[in-house]
Image: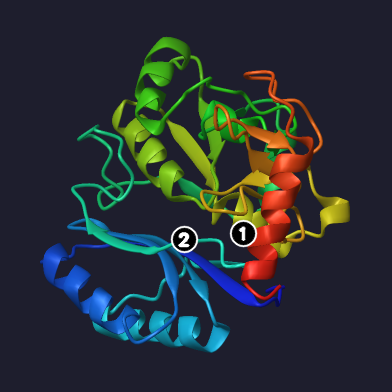
Amino acid sequence: MIPTSQFFVATFYEFFHLEDPSAQRTWLLERLAETDIRGSVLVATEGINGTLAGDETQLQGLLDQLRGSLGIDLGNCKFSSSPFQPFKRLRVRARSELVTFKQPLADPGERTGTYVPPADWDEVLRRDDVRVVDARNDFEIAVGSFEGAEDPCTQNFTDFAEFAAKNLDPTRDRAIAMYCTGGIRCEKASSYLLAKGFETVYHLEGGILRYFEEIDAKESSFQGECYVFDERVSVDQELEPGAFANCENCGWPVRQEQVCDSCGVNQCDAVANDWRARSRASGG
């Protein structure tokens, strides 16, 4: 179910060959200038990746224009909501990669892991012959994860290759299952592992956000909330803004009423007041 709120949030990506990312950036900026949409979009020769927030009609119109302009279906588009505008500004950038990994072997255009629909994901989690790895970073995992998943203890996605080299073995780990926020990091990570000789690599189709869309919270195997890279900081399993904020001292995600485990600063009033102020400023 797509939630309804004052601000509609779309998270999307697609891997395909884009001949001229700079021209696509210009086109996007021209289209977005006609709207009140904010957020972040990356374009590269390997495709497009973005999260945008705004009025539902404007946002759906832009997504339709993107599909028509690029000839893609944006099948990996996930939706959530926010009572306040979760982005301070709009950024559209041309980059060498949609998500920085710095591993030439990771080529989703050539190969990628086996998609597991959210409805089948819990069955994969229960299998004894599958090693489940969270492909996100330490601060994201601190907010929530699937029970029993392995924490690679990475601080950024480029660390994942080192984790794999030290901890995963294609002669021993016959089947790996991975998940991330929206699915894009698993596209790269699964492609990389397959190129490294791993026999079977699964990944959660559409990531945690798609799982939240399709699986009732009462039936969910996910523990906690999902970290998101915008002013909401986290979303709960109903895809509404969660209980976390970034520590004003060190940036670590922490529940609004708690002391930050990373630096010890008490977050009680400061983050809650900031959340309320942003909500009021947005008319929420």
Q: Label 2: state its secondary structure.
A: loop
Q: Residue at x 26, y 44 (%)?
A: 107
Q: Residue at x 73, y 34 (%)?
A: 267
- Disc 1 or 2, which lies upstream in sequence? 2
Residue 151 picture location, percent across and down? 59, 23
Query: Horizontal placement of 276 versus 208: left or right?
Result: right
Residue 258 picture location, percent across and down? 79, 30
The residue that label 2 is drawn on is 88
Q: Residue 31 has which mark? A: none
The quarter of the displayed image where residue 209 is located = bottom right
Mark 2 residue crowding within 10 angstroms, few (<14) / some (14–19) / many (20+): few
- The residues tagged by marks 1 and 2 sit, at their Cα atoms, a distance apart of 25 Å
Q: Label 1: state its secondary structure.
A: helix
- Relative vertical location of residue 197 with respect to residue 64 in this rendering, above or below: above
What amino acid type is highlighted by mark number 1? Answer: Arg
Q: Nearer the viewer, mark 1 or mark 2?
A: 2
